[in-house]
Image (spheres, rainbow, N blue to C red):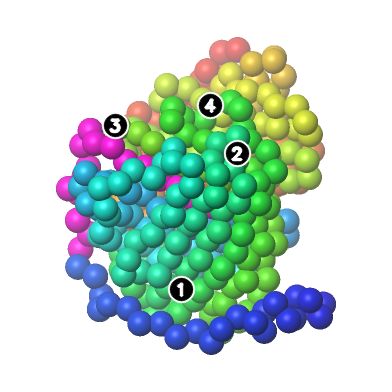
Amino acid sequence: MSPTRRSLVAALPALTLAWPAAAAPSKDLTVRGRTIYSESSMVMSMTPDGRSAVTLRFCRFPEAGMTWLWCHVVRDGQLYAFTSHDLPCGPERLAGQPDAAYRAPPMVASLVRTGGGESLASVRIEAALPFHRSRAAPHGPGRAAGRFSGVFTPTRRLAATVNAGRDEVYGLLRAEIEVGGRRLVHEGAAKFHEQRQEGPRFEGPFCYSWLAGGDAAAATLLTAAGAGGGWQFGAAEDALADMAIDSPAAARRADYRFKSGRRVAGDLAALVRYQIPVYDRVWQGSFVRGRVDGQAVVGVVNDWTTAPDIYAAARARAGAL
């Protein structure tokens, strides 16, 4: 470790946490299927070697007075996870404001955005949470204390629409992490999103992915209606016309068809697969590494599986072309 890295890690304060007793079953079913305003904001990042990853996500339901908080840290294949869908939420709307600070007291976690959209300057993330050392963590506090603090620096914005009301911005994250009795400095490709919507969340099936490597980056979304998002290769962006990807598995093939007529394909291998409880079901996440169009990439592929089968339908469309 270099002197600079050593001094940064040593500067982390001693980790002392206080947290509530084990949570009761989540009340997230109270917003299931409801047509009410909600907003989410998230930073996710992964190092090029796939050894370290960080995610922090807030989803606010101001009218329901409810915040969902997701936070994950990966180090050398070990996952530390925190999930709570029962945290309070004020009536204010943060998404779309010039600056915004997402928090969910009494848990110690924050995502503070300076600027927004084309004017996004930075996003600072911090958390000190009682994680579960598990790939299938329940709601509420675990017994593995962990904390991190970092800054997301934007480099470019995806122009293609992933989902209505959603901004996707690529960049870099540098964070200081203490978890599992270890301290480290994380430096990796990252992405930030902020999304507003009026419709219900987690209704139809979807497969979302963020991938990055070299001068390439992508945010894509496969749903029953088709595909959205796109890839950036160097300074050029290609919006998706359609895509196909294998259903959730340790290894997956992905094929992309762009509006320009170009086609690329890749193979992705899961380094860590995990679950998050949502309503009475589970959302499936994976941190991945692979190659797309010959470019080494890392990132995430996340799935919400329910009828209809979007994977088979996409393969059928690809086969008919």
Extreme residue toward the right, this view: 2
Query: Which mark, by number, is residue 199?
Result: 3
Between label 1 and label 2, give the one nearer the viewer.
2
Gap in angstroms between the C-alphas marked 2 and 4 = 18 Å
Task: Give the secondary structure at mark 4.
Answer: loop
Q: Which residue is mark 2?
A: 119
Q: Which residue is mark 1?
A: 128
Is residue 53 shown to the viewer in this render?
no
Please state if 288 lies on the left or on the right of 143 as rendered. Answer: right
Gap in angstroms between the C-alphas marked 3 and 4 = 17 Å
Q: Position of residue 258 (x, y in %)?
A: 65, 20
Residue interval drawn in magenta: 25-43
| Quadrant showing the C terminus | top right
- Of residue 155 and residue 79, the one placed in the foreground of this image is 155
**Amino acid type, mark 4:** Thr
Task: Give the secondary structure at mark 3.
Answer: loop
Q: Residues within 10 Å of mark 4 (few under 14, many from 20)?
A: some
Please state if 73 lies on the left or on the right of 217 as rendered. Answer: left
**Amino acid type, mark 2:** Ser
Q: Which residue is mark 4?
A: 161
Q: Residue at x 32, y 78 (%)?
A: 19
Q: Residues within 10 Å of mark 1 (few under 14, many from 20)?
A: many
Quick check: 123 above or below 156? below
Q: Are marks 3 and 1 in contact (CB under 8 Å)?
A: no
Q: Position of residue 150 (x, y in %)?
A: 60, 64
Please state if 34 lies on the left or on the right of 302 as rendered. Answer: left
Extreme residue toward the left, this view: 30
Of mark 3 and mark 2, the one earlier in the sequence is 2
Q: Residues within 10 Å of mark 3 (few under 14, many from 20)?
A: few
Of mark 3 and mark 1, the one earlier in the sequence is 1
Gap in angstroms between the C-alphas marked 1 and 4 = 33 Å
Query: Which mark, by number, is residue 16?
Result: none
